[in-house]
Image (spheres, rainbow, N blue to C red):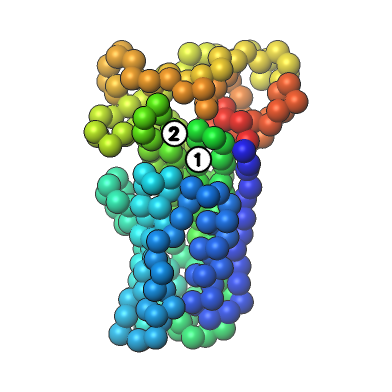
Amino acid sequence: MSYFRKTIAVRSEELAFLQAFIHGVTASDSRIVCPTDDLAEQFEDTSNTPHFTLVIDGTVSLQFTRSSDLTNRLDYYTIEESRHRFTAFGLWIGSGAVHYDETYVRTWKCSVMSSEKVLRIDFGSYHTDMTNPDLSVMVIKGENESASAVSVYSSGVTPPAVAGTFYFSDQVPLKKVDRLPYVYQPHQAAEMELIKNKVFVVQDTANRAFATDGLYDITAVTPNTVLNIGGRSYYSLDAHTLMEV
């Protein structure tokens, strides 16, 4: 179980920055892997448009693709998701466009919240306030497979991924249920009310789909904060959902 925020800023050429970013992200949790093994080779031919993929818990694949081939200056990579649940968008590396072989401070940000049954990873451009990341991806482990949801920045806010629509591989849409949707001693951790699991229903129905003890229901708390309850650390994914970290 862990929680961290990391700014990956490297004064280097573009390839070294990407390698540092991939290492930093994949080192944060063994369930985040990069199957791309030819990134260095892609930079050997300037007619190429380099790209790499991150796979999250074997469930969500994200492809990062350079905005143009290596003959052109770059200031962002586009991100696309394997299920096309959002329109491809740019993750900006800095305030100006530079050639791939220029030594320059390139920066991306990421946050990872992980437990045995839950994994959330957020990505941000060099200037992003990570309380509203450019992209948030969440995977919850069910009894036999994992369900995933994604959320992207829009109109000044990134909705919490946990409040979005989750899908198993069968594409049935699922939504969480908040069973303690009220305020009760929000600043007194010892007196907050908890239910030590979270129920999901089929979207737009009252049909129970599954429950996970990797998430907790809680009376109203401040989202995106770390709480200490009973000597354990929890992260508030939204106002009524906790995960242990």
Name the residue rendered at 24%, 33% in the picture. Answer: 170
Would you say 217 lies left or right of 151 here? right
SS label for mark 2: strand
Which quadrant is home to the C terminus? top right
Residue 240 shows in the view: no
- Percent position of residue 237, x then y: 54, 33
- Position of residue 7 relative to residue 49, above or below, is above
Name the residue rendered at 43%, 38% in the picture. Answer: 139
SS label for mark 1: strand
- Percent position of residue 152, x then y: 40, 46
201 or 154, which lies in front?
201
- Position of residue 37 relative to residue 200, above or below, is below
Res 88 → quadrant: bottom left
What kind of residue is marked 1? Leu
Q: Give neighbour class at mark 1: few <14, some 14-19, many 20+ (Cα, 10 Å).
A: many
Residue matched to label 2: 140
Res 144 → quadrant: top left
- Percent position of residue 239, x then y: 55, 26
Residue matched to label 1: 119
Please tell me which of labels 2 and 1 falls first in the chain.
Answer: 1
What kind of residue is marked 2? Ile
Dots 2, 1 in contact, CB < 8 A? no
Would you say 127 lies left or right of 204 here? right
Q: Residue furthest front?
A: 144
Name the residue rendered at 38%, 20% in the picture. Answer: 210
209 or 155, which lies in front?
209
Name the residue rendered at 34%, 15% in the picture. Answer: 208
Q: Give neighbour class at mark 2: few <14, some 14-19, many 20+ (Cα, 10 Å).
A: many
Marks 2/1: CA–CA distance: 7 Å
Would you say 130 lies left or right of 160 here? right
- Percent position of residue 189, x then y: 71, 20
